[in-house]
Image (spheres, rainbow, N blue to C red):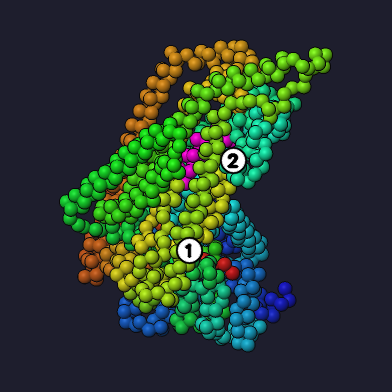
């Protein structure tokens, strides 16, 4: 049967002699065990025994099948050695605190190590007679020498291990060298020459490869971080201004990436095909500047307003022809235009939502760093690799900033105040801000109404014409500081305060968006109403031109010059131009504000401070702080403009990419040169999902008007890729009908059936509901587990502290005895199990039974709290496994 | 090969390889770095194990160490009598521990010694204050430093005795995600 065999192999392993032979041939070991231990131990081939340290190292690296026990005992020995030396060192350290103490301490461990070795012997001894007597009744006479031999062999093994691990011993070099020499001498004495040739080389080779691999990984990581654009700039800003300011720049970088993708999509699939394969400029009316405008079409003032030649270029919707296919590729441009417009939104939605999801995932996976925030900052934040004083300076700044951030967090969580007062103040603040928002909303509404009245009048003054813009910019200028002042009442943590501020200014800016869209819609409707008339005029002109008399009938009349054809106002291009202008002016305003508000102010404060009556730097103007909320919202709303406008002005994304690029460099410079860090540097929330949430909202808001115009407004009759169609989306239907096989068309028609769509939507809702509830329950479970872990930690801590105090108070007697009791209890249990088992004569079950007890008992000393483990409590616990094992052997049927 | 023989014997090199994480080449390179620090002090023949020490002022001015706020502690910990003057053995020891190949336990042991400013085998509040001050160049106010030290003790002190033992420290540093990547010196 296999069980006796297994137990034999185990018993052989325990003695630590023939374990090298065992993995290869358990049967041989079995035989050797039966015939007596001597042969197996003596005949073990010297080459094997004298295996060089390299091989040993390797064997240790991969789990060796034979000797878990040996490893464990070794580890235990090491641990004990360390503890004891630590304990002794404390005494010493108390006695002597001068420099020499450290020297002694460093020299101290070896002695203890030896002591440990010596102390191990007594407990290794008792097992031997038993095992040998049990294993081999035949060779009883030679048991003594064999036992010695086994011990020596074990020591040799140990020494070899020591040689192999010498480099990772925390000893000074002299000590290591001495130990090494001693160990080598020992090994050589008892085993002949240590194999130095192949194993060494192999080890060296392995080390080399490991180093190469490490270096490669390092280089690769460096390369990866180098590939992240502006990483160093942002790190620099982060180290001086904190992660909250850096979060804006990270957001900006992310935005740049998204816009780059959109740019690639639009340029690659719409603009470049049109430029390469479409009809050239001047071939048809929509691609030509009208005669009346031609004189001024190249003036800068006209171009600056995106009129003239720019208006009739591929940057705008109106330039595209409604030809179904263009070029020799037969590229379906209108279809591509439509699909790109849709996929711009699709891609943006997917990427925003994915990044939100990623952020939330990332925020949940941090466990330990919560518990050790300050410790990690203190002990692992300095990078010992830094060898450059500039880097070191910024690292100092970074560490200080991060400490400050954590301190703010900590202070905030410890704050205890009058809850009622805080609550009252918060309600008051919200009330005030809602009043402000309502007031400004009404003001905007009022002004817009008035402007609509003004537009009907003939002569309007400059103020009347620009009243809306003036009011809007005044609101935008004065409301955010007002909100900030009111928010001071609330006394939130700055991070939460930033969120509130963002939300409030967002609400204010929505008014901005609303007026802009309203004005635009009015304009579009006006143009649409005029369209019919212009269409008639165009027809009439063309008709007259071709049918007028006074031309030789025989010669076909040359077509009317495209510049002379009367044409509609092309509302799509007008909308595109509006967005273009807005983006550019927004960019300029931002830059000028930075230049004036930050840079000039900083210069003024810096240089006028020498000749001013009060301290400018500390006093009133001082330096500007970086306005996170304003910048983030500016970025978000700008992106909203881009999303709305990109359908009508494909070139808009290109301009936006330029804008983001320049603003990255410009703002980085401005921040570093003319801003000061916030008074309370605070950590950005781990996920910038709040920014993303706002962005998603804006994306949705900007999707609405575009979807509305696509679905329910007729396209202009004489410009753009959809001209001549009833609605823009007709291009889809056209493609399906003409280019796809008929059955596909049928399938699409079937899919568009409301009877199918409504159930599909219902199904989606159900799925959302289900997934939502699942995720909720999971997060609840997660929170509970976290709580449990926290509680466990607390319990462990208090446990340790109680024991630690006990050891401190009565020099470790009480807990030791208690642990001893525990181990003894275990011991008796184990000893009784095999006995009773052997009485009942069921070998298989016994083997399993003791096997199950064994690991538990083995784990005990390792998991014991270290405070309770001084000195003499150990031999029994160490001896236990052996005894139980030998007990197990006893049950083996003879 | 010839130049190596003049500095170290074959056995010495073998022994150094066994005792450090360096290959023969790197040991030689380190030796020349060491020798460059004080060419007039360090002989080019180490076969007879001369007792030479390079003073801390020279060790601390190495580009690898000169910007490190803990350079003095590092030198003290690895020097024989805690004064920062290093023999070649100490020098090799130091860079062996700080090398990429050194295991976490070894690094943690020496990191503990480095942060234990008063050499009493415990990181006490005073040691922590020293560490923070060095890390932030004294930019934090006294209350902030105290708060930080309290928090560290609160977090990492397993047995609540008001100071960090080696075991507490190891327990904490084992979980630190970037201890291994930051606690090493490339040479």
Q: Is residue A41 above or below residue B142?
A: above
Q: Secondary structure at mark 1?
A: helix
* Secondary structure that dominates the magenta span: helix
Residue occupying the far bottom of the picture: B40
Quadrant (top left, top right, bottom left, bottom right) of the C terminus of chain A:
top left
Quadrant (top left, top right, bottom left, bottom right) of the N terminus of chain A:
top left
Q: Position of residue A692 (x, y in %)?
A: 43, 42
Residue occupying image coordinates x 26% and y 52%? A490
- Can you tell which mark lies on residue A306? 2
Of residues A498 and A889, the one nearer the viewer is: A498
Residue occupying image coordinates x 53% and y 72%? A389
Can I make out residue A1 in this image?
A: no
Q: Is residue A228 above or below residue B71?
A: above
Q: CA distance from mark 1 to mark 2?
A: 31 Å
Label 1, residues with CA under 10 Å away: few <14, some 14-19, many ≥20: some
Quickly name the residue at label 1.
Answer: A600
In magenta, the rendered stretch is A635-651
Can I make out residue A802 in this image?
A: yes
Quarter of the image holding residue A281? Answer: top right
Which-is-in-front pick, marks 1 and 2? 2
Residue occupying the far right of the picture: A554
Side of A786 where A583 appears, left or right: right
């Amino acid at each position: 049967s296999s069980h006796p065999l297994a137990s034999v192999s185990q018993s052989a392993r325990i003695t630590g002699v023939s374990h090298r032979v065992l993995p290869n041939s358990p049967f041989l070991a079995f035989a050797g065990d039966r015939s007596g231990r001597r042969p197996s131990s003596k005949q073990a081939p010297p080459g094997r025994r004298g295996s060089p340290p390299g091989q040993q190292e390797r064997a240790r690296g991969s789990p060796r099948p034979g000797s878990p026990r040996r490893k464990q005992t070794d580890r235990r020995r090491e641990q004990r050695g360390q503890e004891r030396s630590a304990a002794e060192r404390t005494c010493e350290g108390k006695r002597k605190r001068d420099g020499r103490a450290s020297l002694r301490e460093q020299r101290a461990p070896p002695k203890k190590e030896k002591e440990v070795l010596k102390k191990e012997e007594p407990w290794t001894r008792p097992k031997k007679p038993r095992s040998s007597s049990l294993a081999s009744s035949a060779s009883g006479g030679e048991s003594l020498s064999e036992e010695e031999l086994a011990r020596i062999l074990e020591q040799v093994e140990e020494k070899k291990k020591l040689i192999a691990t010498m480099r990772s011993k925390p000893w000074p070099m002299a000590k290591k060298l001495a130990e090494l020499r001693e160990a080598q001498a020992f090994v050589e004495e008892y085993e002949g020459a240590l194999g130095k040739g192949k194993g060494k080389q192999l080890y060296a080779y392995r080390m080399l490869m490991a180093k190469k691999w490490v270096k490669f990984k390092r280089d690769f990581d460096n390369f990866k971080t180098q590939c992240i654009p502006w990483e160093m700039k942002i790190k620099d800003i982060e180290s001086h201004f904190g992660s909250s300011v850096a979060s804006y720049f990270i957001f900006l970088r992310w935005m740049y990436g998204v816009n780059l993708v959109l740019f690639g999509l639009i340029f690659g699939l719409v603009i470049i095909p049109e430029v390469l394969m479409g009809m050239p400029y001047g071939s048809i009316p929509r691609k030509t500047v009208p005669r009346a405008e031609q004189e001024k079409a190249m003036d800068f003032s006209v171009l600056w307003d995106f009129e003239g030649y720019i208006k009739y270029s591929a940057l705008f919707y109106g330039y595209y022809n409604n030809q179904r296919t263009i070029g020799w590729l037969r590229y379906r441009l209108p279809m591509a235009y439509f699909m790109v417009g849709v996929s711009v939104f699709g891609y943006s939605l997917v990427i925003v939502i994915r990044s939100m999801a990623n952020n939330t995932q990332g925020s949940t996976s941090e466990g330990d760093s919560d518990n050790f925030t300050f410790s990690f900052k203190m002990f692992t934040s300095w990078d010992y690799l830094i060898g450059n004083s500039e880097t070191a300076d910024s690292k100092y700044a970074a560490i200080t900033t991060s400490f400050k951030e954590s301190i703010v967090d900590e202070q905030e969580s410890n704050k205890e105040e009058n809850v009622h007062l805080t609550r009252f103040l918060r309600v008051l603040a919200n009330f005030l801000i809602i009043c402000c928002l309502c007031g400004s909303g009404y003001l905007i509404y009022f002004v817009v109404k008035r402007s609509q009245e003004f537009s009907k009048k003939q002569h309007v003054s400059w103020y009347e014409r620009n009243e809306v813009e003036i009011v809007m910019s005044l609101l935008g200028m004065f409301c955010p500081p007002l909100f900030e002042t009111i928010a001071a009442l609330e006394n939130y943590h700055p991070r939460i305060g930033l969120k509130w501020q963002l939300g409030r200014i967002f609400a204010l800016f929505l008014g901005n968006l609303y007026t802009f869209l309203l004005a635009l819609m009015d304009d579009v409707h006006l143009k649409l109403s005029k369209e019919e008339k212009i269409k008639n005029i165009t027809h009439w002109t063309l008709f007259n031109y071709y049918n007028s008399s006074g031309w030789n009938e025989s010669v076909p009349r040359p077509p009317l010059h495209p510049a002379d054809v009367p044409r509609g106002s092309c509302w799509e291009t007008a909308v595109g131009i509006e967005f273009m202008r807005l983006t550019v002016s927004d960019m300029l305003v931002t830059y000028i504000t930075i230049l004036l508000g930050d840079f000039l102010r900083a210069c003024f404060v810096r240089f006028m401070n020498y000749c001013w009556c009060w301290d400018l730097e500390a006093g009133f103007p001082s330096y500007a702080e970086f306005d996170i909320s304003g910048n983030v919202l500016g970025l978000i709303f700008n992106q909203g403009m881009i999303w709305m406008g990109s359908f009508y002005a494909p070139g808009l994304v290109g301009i936006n990419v330029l804008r983001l690029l320049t603003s990255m460099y410009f703002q980085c410079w401005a921040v570093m040169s003319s801003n000061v860090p916030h008074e309370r540097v605070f950590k950005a929330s781990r996920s910038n999902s709040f920014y993303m949430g706002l962005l998603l909202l804006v994306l949705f808001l900007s999707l609405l008007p575009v979807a509305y115009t696509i679905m329910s407004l007729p396209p202009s009759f004489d410009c753009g890729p959809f001209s001549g169609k009833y609605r823009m989306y007709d291009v889809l239907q056209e493609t399906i009908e003409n280019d796809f096989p008929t059955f596909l068309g049928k399938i699409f028609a079937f899919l568009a059936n409301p009877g199918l769509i409504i159930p599909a939507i219902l199904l989606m809702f159900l799925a959302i509901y289900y997934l939502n509830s699942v995720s909720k329950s999971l997060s609840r479970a997660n929170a509970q587990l976290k709580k449990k872990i926290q509680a466990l930690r607390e319990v462990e801590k208090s446990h340790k502290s109680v024991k630690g105090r006990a050891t401190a108070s009565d020099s470790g007697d009480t807990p030791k005895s208690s642990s001893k009791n525990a181990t003894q209890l275990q011991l008796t249990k184990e000893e009784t199990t095999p006995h009773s088992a052997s009485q009942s004569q069921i070998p298989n079950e016994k083997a399993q039974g003791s096997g199950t007890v064994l690991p538990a008992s083995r784990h005990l000393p390792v998991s014991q709290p270290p405070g309770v483990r001084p000195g003499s409590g150990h031999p029994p616990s160490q001896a236990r496994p052996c005894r139980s094992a030998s007990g197990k052997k006893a049950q083996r049927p003879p | 090969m010839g130049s190596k023989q003049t500095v170290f014997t074959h056995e010495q090199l073998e022994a150094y390889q066994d005792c450090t994480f360096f290959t023969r080449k790197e040991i030689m390179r380190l030796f020349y770095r060491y020798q460059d620090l004080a060419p007039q002090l360090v002989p080019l023949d180490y076969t007879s194990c001369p007792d030479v020490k390079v003073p801390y002022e020279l060790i601390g001015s190495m580009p690898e160490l000169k910007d490190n706020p803990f350079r003095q502690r590092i030198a003290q910990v690895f020097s024989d009598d805690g004064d920062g003057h290093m023999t070649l053995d100490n020098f090799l020891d130091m860079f062996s521990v700080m090398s990429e190949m050194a295991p976490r336990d070894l690094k943690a042991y020496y990191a503990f010694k480095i942060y234990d400013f008063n050499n009493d085998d415990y990181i006490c509040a005073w040691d922590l204050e020293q560490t923070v001050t060095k890390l932030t160049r004294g930019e934090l106010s006294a209350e902030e430093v105290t708060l930080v030290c309290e928090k560290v003790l609160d977090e990492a002190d397993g047995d609540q005795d008001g100071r960090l033992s080696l075991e507490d420290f190891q327990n904490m540093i084992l979980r630190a995600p970037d201890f291994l990547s930051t606690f090493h010196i490339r040479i």
